[in-house]
Image (spheres, rainbow, N blue to C red):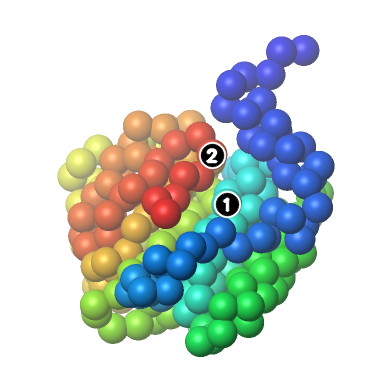
């Protein structure tokens, strides 16, 4: 059986990662003497929401695991990572599955140890975050999950990354992107309802990546999230079915 490029590439990425010892994959980047005199980059906040609904294809597990590995290897001192499942939970019942910080330190060896520790924590938590054969949620309230997690980004100015490991198919009273392909007017009306219910947080300074985007109405789903990014001030930096790429 031939595998499509979108499926084969993440499978190869996960296979390659599995062949590398976890401690090696989490090795901090090499530094030079000049690095000690450069200003440290500002800390970032990573919010990762994993779609737990039935609309996510089983083969997307490899793609999502590869994305988590990319985030783990990108962590640096001062960063915070919050990860949670997105499904039936509302803002009131939202609970993070993982919340970790990469402690900073003036000592280089201690700083590198902190990076390695945080990286290993995320890699070890990844199988539970993206479980195999788990009971899927009956709804996908992505808007609720984002609104619940958004306070983690803090006040402006900020550097944040919102990663949705999802097909992007919102299924809620606000918008059901699985039922029909929404046109521009319907998307505008849905976002107006979301704003009225407090589901459009301020995401200025936040990069939005959606890994595993799909659904029966792919074009309409993408238009919805582009409109959502514009309405919240986020920058839609990645959308589709290719492996996650982060700027260093």
1 or 2: tag closer to the N-terminus: 1
**Residue nearer the viewer, 219 or 61:** 61
Residue drawn at the location 58% of the way across and 69% of the way down: 83
Labelled pair 1, 2 in contact (Cβ < 8 Å): yes
CA separation in Å, label 1 and label 2: 9 Å
Residue 88 in view, yes or no: no
For the point 48% across and 40% down, the residue is 213
Q: Is residue 23 shown above or below 58? A: below
Q: Nearer the viewer, residue 242 or 220?
A: 242
Mark 2: few/some/many CA within 10 Å (<14, 14-19, 20+):
many
Percent coordinates x, y for residue 144 in the rendering: 44, 69
Residue 17 pos. (x, y %): 73, 44
Taking the image as drawn, is residue 39 in sight? yes
Q: Nearer the viewer, mark 1 or mark 2?
A: 1
Quadrant for residue 184, please give it: top left
The mark found on residue 70 in the picture is 1
In this figure, which residue is indicated by the disc labeled 2? 243
């Amino acid at each position: 059986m031939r595998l499509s490029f979108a499926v084969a590439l993440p499978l190869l990425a996960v296979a390659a990662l599995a062949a590398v010892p976890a401690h090696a994959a989490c090795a901090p980047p090499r530094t030079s003497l000049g690095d000690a005199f450069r200003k440290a980059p500002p800390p970032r906040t990573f919010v990762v929401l994993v779609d737990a609904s039935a609309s996510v294809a089983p083969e997307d597990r490899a793609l999502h695991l590869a994305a988590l590995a990319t985030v783990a290897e990108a962590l640096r001192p001062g960063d915070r990572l919050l990860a949670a499942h997105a499904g039936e939970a509302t803002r009131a019942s939202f609970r993070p599955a993982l919340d970790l910080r990469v402690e900073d330190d003036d000592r280089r060896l201690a700083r590198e140890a902190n990076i390695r520790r945080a990286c290993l924590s995320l890699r070890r938590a990844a199988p539970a975050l993206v479980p195999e054969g788990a009971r899927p949620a009956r709804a996908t309230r992505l808007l609720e999950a984002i609104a619940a997690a958004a306070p983690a980004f803090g006040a402006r100015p900020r550097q944040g990354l919102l990663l949705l490991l999802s097909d992007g198919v919102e299924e809620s009273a606000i918008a059901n992107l699985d039922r029909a392909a929404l046109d521009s007017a319907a998307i505008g009306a849905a976002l107006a309802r979301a704003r009225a219910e407090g589901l459009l947080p301020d995401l200025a300074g936040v990069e939005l990546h959606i890994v595993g985007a799909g659904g029966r109405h792919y074009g309409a789903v993408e238009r919805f999230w582009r409109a959502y990014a514009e309405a919240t001030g986020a920058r839609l930096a990645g959308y589709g079915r290719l492996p996650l790429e982060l700027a260093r």
